[in-house]
Structure formats: C-alpha cells, structure tokens
Amino acid sequence: MERLIDSLRLRHHLAPEDYATLLEGAAEGPLLAYAMQAAREVAVGRLGTGVFIRGLIEITNYCRNDCYYCGIRRSNRRVERYRLSKEEILACCRLGNTIGFRTFVLQGGEDAALSDDWIEEVVNAIRREFPDNAITLSLGERSREAYERFFRAGADRYLLRHETATREHYAQLHPAAMSFDHRMQNLRELKEIGYQTGTGVMVGSPGQTTEHLVRDILFIEEFRPQMIGLGPYIPQNDTPFAGSPAGSIRTTLMLLAIFRLMFPDALIPSTTALATLAPDGREQGILAGANVVMPNLSPPANRAKYALYNDKKATGLESAEGLRGLERQLNAIGYRISWERGDYRGPADGREATLRHEHTKE
C-alpha cells in the first residue's frame, strides 16, 4: 500500500477505492508511519519547519443551532453563556499583537445577538488598529451580503467546516431546520467573494463510515480550500451523542497526511481536539503534515465555557501563555514557531474574487 502514498505524493490524486484502502489501513503502524513521513517531507520541503500560530478568540458561546454533537448547542441548559464586547475582543487582539501574533481568529457560535452590523464594526476596528495583521472569521452560516460586508471591512479568511459531504450523514448530525445545501452554498460563496476559505470534517463523528470519509476527501479535492481543518470527534456529555466513542487518532493522522500530499501548500492546523485525546497529539499532527496551531487568546475566565466537547484543553500549551512550552515541544521534533501572517501562497484555483478589501483599494 505504500505505492498509493507514493502515487498521491506525485499526482495529488487517487481513485476513491484507494483512499478507502489508506483509511482502512491507518491502524497499521508501518503504513501510517510511511504516510506521515511522506507528508512531513512535503510540508517541510514546501513550507519549511516554521509552524504558523493563530490567536484564537472565542467571542461567544451562544448559538441558535441545535447540532446534536455540539456542547454549546441551543438546547444545552447547562452551559454558562457569555459573549465578548467589542472592547474585550480588541483587548485580546492587543495582547496577542504584543506577544507577536499576526493573525487573529474570531470564532463563535451562531449568536443571533451579534448582528451583521456589529461584526462588521468589530472587523473594521481590528483592521484600523492592526492594519498588517490577518483577520480570520469562523462564525458559521451567514448571508452572502454579510460575508461581502465582512470582507470589505477587512476580514481575510473564513473557516466553515462542511462536517460531512454526505447529505444523509449531515441529517444524522443536525436537526431538520439546518440545510446541507445551504452549508455548501455558503462555502462556494466565500470562495467567490475572495476569502482564503477553510473547510473540514470531524473524524469519527456518529454514523460516519469509510465511504463518508472518502466522499469528504473527494469534495475537498474538488473544492480546493486554502485551509483544511480536521480533528477527531470527541463527545460532549450534554448532547444526544454523549455516549458515542471518540474518533480515531490514527485515522485523523492518515487524513492529515492525505491532505498534505494532495495539497502541498495548504494551511492545515494541528487541532486542540488532537491534543485533548493524546498528550502528544499536537506534535503528531505536525509530524503528519500540519503546519498551523491556534493558541487561545480568549479571556482565561471564559475558555472553559466554550465547551464544544468533553475535557477540551482550556489551559496549558494550547493557550497564549503556554507559548514557551509550545516552542520547546516544537523544537523537540525539529520545528519552530513562525511569527509570520502565514497567508496561503499556493496556486490559485482559477476563481476570481468579486470584491476587494476597502483598506487595500488603490
């Protein structure tokens, strides 16, 4: 099966049945090790040993949606809710900028109280104060008009995981009020507008099969996102899937390697979920081809409240305060922190942006 890894590295594409073979073979140590080594060599060869850091600011844990797997779902009455003010968000950015962060990631539930006007105002304020820093949004499904406004205000990137490329599986994970087609439409709109767009999956989510994961690979292969985010599914106690098993770390690492070999220039995080399931999960993700980590800049008092899943890491090396320890961890495996913005620098996919940032107009 190593020949499949070699072929993917050379051609950036395999037949669907070959992807299934690799996923089903992820439990085999030698095959996974070979895939990770190939992905690591590609990542270092194209991008060097620097790992880009993003300052994560979790701006709200209110959410209008009721996704069956998510700890901040609307129906969870046990969550202590919060939302940050514009000044609190700017304070997080100031702290991050002082430390050296050059990318801020504003993430949150789909909070109905955060209007498009308010988000646009926040993005504008960050852009005015930090004109050279990248702004990434991960705020769920919005209208095209809203996405265009945020882009004009200065947002550079948008993260929206498709979660599953299989309609029937999507229905297993979400209530009927949520639309698979709308999620896919939003992703297309984000790319058309000109965002560096990220998508991805939960590995091992309830009901997921190898066939589903192959469809995810094929979707991402066709969609060609600049960023690919994936991590193992982890259950949350206050959801309908509380008793479900966590996703496989090995399958997650194999997928990371596959996507690195498929997209040598992509921005691929080693996620907190990996670090939650295994003490060396973050390092293993880097060794499988990931090249981004996202330490938490959120106010410390709020981090544990953003409880998407059980035992989510909320202190330590995944926080901004842990950067020295993170650097030591990366150095131990031959990597280092990169303080650059870390924009996507790979080939364009032929689509033209329909908008420009107002702050960059000539």
Image: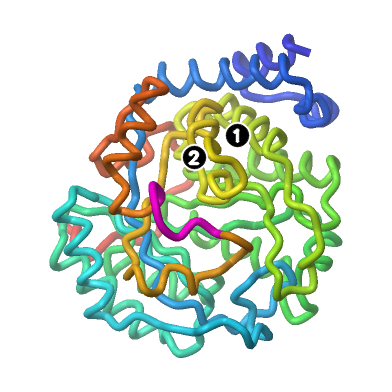
Q: Residues within 10 Å of mark 2 (few under 14, many from 20)?
A: many
What segment carries the magenta color? Answer: 312-318
| Quarter of image, res 223 | top right
Residue 63 sits in quarter: bottom right
Dot 1 lies on which element?
helix
Query: On the rendered structure, is 176 left or right of 156?
Result: right
Count of numbered circles in the view: 2
- Determine which of the numbered discs, if any, sits on residue 256 in the image: 1
Q: Which circle marks residue 116 in the picture?
A: none
Query: Contact (CB < 8 A) between labels 1 and 2?
Result: yes
Is 122 contained in the magenta span? no
Q: Which mark is residue 268?
A: 2
Classify residue 89 by image quadrant.
Answer: bottom left
Q: Residues within 10 Å of mark 1 (few under 14, many from 20)?
A: many
Q: Main secondary structure of the magenta part?
A: loop
Which element carries disc 2, helix, strand or loop?
loop
- Assign the N terminus to one quadrant of the image: top right
317 part of magenta stretch: yes
Give how far across and how far down residue 40 sits, in percent.
50, 20
